[in-house]
Each structure stands twice: as structure tokens, then as C-alpha cells.
Image (cartoon, rainbow, N blue to C red):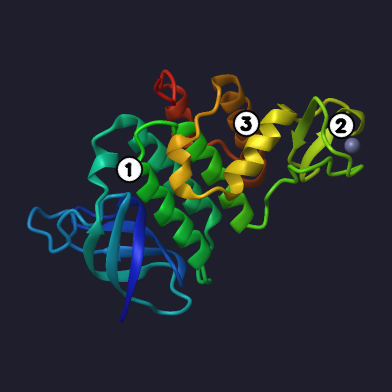
């Protein structure tokens, strides 16, 4: 039996009384585990196995087994301020869905886990400027996964970007007008500067970093396309987010 911190990313029903829980752990990567009895009213798990919950879990691991056995979970943080707000909940679902896609099983995921926790904690206390938080998360997720696009100069001719560039996933980053041939998502040089800043700035700065709506839209569209290229499919929660009127509040 191992005790480990984890974040519940996703759950689905297995039988009338049990669920499969997808967890992100710092040192075992993504773990799929069965929680027996969790669907009963008087379950020992309480509400600890709701998605978007930071828990301390006890798991029986057996190598080579697809489903592990989750014997206990205690809530460390249930992020109530995320659950009570539709925009925050949508963003947290998107963050967890991306983690599920990017994390691998059975490997050290401490950098991904740290990114997930700080993104959720920042989201829980953020009151506005959700776009900068989401962009910052996207870029850091790509960075931790070794997929960060080149955003400092043209990935082909290495010249600085003047005017605008095209972000192209198959090329690995921004292409200048001369190199691109017009494929990829158009991104203005100013937006690339914003991305450079949001990749490295302190998390506490994000709530104070408001991005003009056209730039935020442009960057999010380009990064969404970039991520879909690597994951192979559109995210459920990205569609949900688009149905919201506007990410940032005045
Ligand atoms: Zn170029």
C-alpha cells in the first residue's frame, strides 16, 4: 500500500457501487484505480473522489495491472470557490482534462503535478483575467511536456518576428511571413511578446495581467490548434468554454 498526494481528474461508474477514478500523482504519473463502495450513500470516501479534488490517497499498486486499487482518500482541498462559479469550474475541468491527456502512467510526474496544483490554487483565488491564467497554463503545460512552441523568433530562419507570424504545430512554433506560406494560426508580434511574458511570470501576477480581448482570442485560438495537433482531438471542456459569453470580466 502506498500513501500519495493526488488530484482527482476524472471519474466514471464501474458498477452500482464502485467507480473508476483517474488520478494524477507526483511520482506514479496518471493512475487509474477502482474505488469500491464509493457510490453508496455512507461511503468511507465521502466527497473526496469528486473530480478537481486534491486528496491524500492510499493505493494498492500491482505492477502490470491496468487498474489499481484505491483503498482510502482524504480531502486536502476541494476548491469550493471553483465549484461555486461556472467559469472557474469550466476552466478547472479543461485543466484536468488536459492533464489526463498529457500525463503518462508509471512515470515521475512531479513537474506536471506541481503545475496542476498551482494552476488550480491560482484559479481558486482569481477574480478576473481568466484568459491570462489559461494562456499561462497552456504554455507551461507544453513546456513541461517538452512541446513548447518557439515563440521568440521564426523557427525556420531564426529572424525576429515583425508584424505577425503564423504559429504552426508541425513546424514547432512561429514562422515569419516569408517562411510560412500562410498556413498555421496568425499571431501578431505583440501577442508573441505576451506569450513570452505569461510563460515565465509569477503566478501571483496573473490576476493583474489583463490582455486585450482580440489578443487573448488570437492566442487562445492558436494554442488550442497547437494542442489539438498534439493530442489528436478537441477537448470536451473547450467546447463548453466557448459557450460562455466572455472569459474575462470587466
Ligand atoms: Zn522565417
Q: Please provide percent x and percent y for residue 105.
A: 50, 66
- Quarter containing the C terminus: top left
The nearer-to-camera label among 1 and 2 is: 1
Label 3 sits on a secondary structure element that is: helix
Image-based side of 243 in relation to 11, left or right: right
Quarter where residue 165 is shown: top right
Q: Is mark 3 within 8 Å of ligand 1?
A: no
Marks 3 and 2 in Cβ contact (< 8 Å): no
Give the spatial CA distance, label 1 vs label 2: 40 Å
* x 54%, y 28%: residue: 211
Looking at the image, is mark 1 or mark 2 earlier in the sequence? 1
The nearer-to-camera label among 3 and 2 is: 3
Q: Which residue is mark 2?
A: 180
Image-based side of 74 in relation to 209, left or right: left
Q: What crowding class fits label 1: few (fewer than 14 Cα within 10 Å), some (14-19), or many (20 or more)? A: some
Q: Is mark 2 within 8 Å of ligand 1?
A: yes
Which label is found at residue 125? Answer: 1
Give the spatial CA distance, label 3 vs label 2: 18 Å
Q: What crowding class fits label 2: few (fewer than 14 Cα within 10 Å), some (14-19), or many (20 or more)? A: some
Label 1 sits on a secondary structure element that is: helix
Q: Is mark 1 within 8 Å of ligand 1?
A: no
Q: Please provide percent x and percent y for residue 56.
A: 28, 67
Q: Which residue is mark 3?
A: 219
Amino acid at each position: 500500500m502506498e500513501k500519495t498526494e493526488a488530484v482527482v481528474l476524472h471519474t466514471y461508474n464501474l458498477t452500482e457501487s464502485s467507480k473508476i477514478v483517474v488520478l494524477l500523482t507526483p511520482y506514479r504519473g496518471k493512475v487509474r484505480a477502482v474505488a469500491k463502495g464509493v457510490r453508496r450513500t455512507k461511503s468511507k470516501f465521502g466527497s473526496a473522489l469528486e473530480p478537481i479534488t486534491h486528496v491524500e490517497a492510499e493505493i494498492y499498486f500491482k505492477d502490470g495491472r491496468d487498474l489499481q486499487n484505491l483503498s482510502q482518500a482524504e480531502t486536502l482541498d476541494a476548491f469550493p470557490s471553483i465549484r461555486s462559479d461556472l467559469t472557474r469550474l469550466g476552466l478547472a475541468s479543461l485543466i484536468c482534462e488536459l492533464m489526463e491527456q498529457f500525463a503518462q502512467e508509471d512515470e515521475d510526474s512531479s513537474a506536471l503535478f506541481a503545475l496542476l496544483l498551482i494552476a488550480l490554487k491560482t484559479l481558486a483565488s482569481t477574480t478576473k483575467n481568466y484568459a491570462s491564467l489559461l494562456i499561462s497554463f497552456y504554455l507551461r503545460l507544453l513546456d513541461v511536456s517538452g512541446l513548447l512552441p518557439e515563440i521568440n523568433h521564426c523557427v525556420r530562419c531564426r529572424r525576429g518576428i515583425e508584424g505577425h507570424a503564423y504559429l504552426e504545430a508541425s513546424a514547432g512554433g512561429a514562422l515569419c511571413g516569408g517562411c510560412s506560406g500562410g498556413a498555421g494560426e496568425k499571431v501578431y508580434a505583440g501577442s508573441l511578446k505576451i506569450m513570452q511574458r505569461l510563460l515565465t511570470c509569477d503566478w501571483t501576477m496573473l490576476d493583474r495581467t489583463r490582455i486585450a480581448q482580440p489578443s487573448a482570442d488570437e492566442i487562445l485560438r492558436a494554442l488550442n490548434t497547437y494542442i489539438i495537433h498534439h493530442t489528436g482531438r478537441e477537448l470536451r471542456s473547450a467546447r463548453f468554454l466557448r459557450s460562455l459569453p466572455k472569459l474575462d470580466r470587466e
